[in-house]
Amino acid sequence: MKLLILFLISFVIPAEANELARKCQFAERIIPIEISQFGISPASNFVKVGDRVCFIVKSVGRSGALFRLENYPIGGSVPAGQERIYSFKATKTGRFKINCGGSCAFAVSELIVSTESEYKAMEEEYNKFKGISERRRHFGY
């Protein structure tokens, strides 16, 4: 399935998408993050410990932003109107702040990294809340 997606992306979508497909091809969770002058969206993201995560960080607006994930060596500058891709493995459980500086007035989001059992319980609770029974659901992208 991943091979088919990579094949289609390489012929249908422009060069920027090829970079995305290459950098995120082994990720279990692909999480798009949008940074604007109003804050960071989404407010929280859920992954399991051990997941390979790919953040696609896009700066929306006229000025760029600074992006940093607490307790992980992930972060940097995102120029206005551009995307940056950050890949890492979630090795520590806990709640980690995603900090933003610059145009987004120091907004904060969070990445919640949980154990397999905690993640499954959260997923089941989410599915009950949404009225979904046995369907597989990912919190990422």
Image: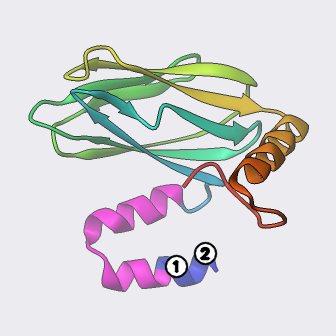
Q: Residue at x 86, y 41 (%)?
A: 121
Residue at disc 2, secondary structure: helix
Question: Which residues, given as a range, are shown in magenta?
Answer: 7-24
Q: Are marks 1 and 2 in contact (CB under 8 Å)?
A: yes
Question: Residue 2 bears which disc, if any?
Answer: 2
Q: Quadrant of the N terminus?
A: bottom right
State left or right for residue 125 relative to residue 95. Answer: right
> Is residue 9 within the magenta segment?
yes
Q: Residue at x 36, y 18 (%)?
A: 107
Main SS type for the magenta part? helix
State left or right for residue 107 relative to residue 70. Answer: left
Residue neighbourhood size for the residue with mark 2, other residues' Cα within 10 Å, grouped as few (<14), some (14–19), many (≥20): few
Q: Residue 83 in the image: x percent, y percent?
A: 29, 46
> Is residue 4 within the magenta segment?
no
Residue at disc 1, secondary structure: helix
Q: Residue 57 in the image: x percent, y percent?
A: 37, 41
User: Which residue is the site of mark 1?
Assistant: 5
Q: Amino acid at mark 1?
A: Ile
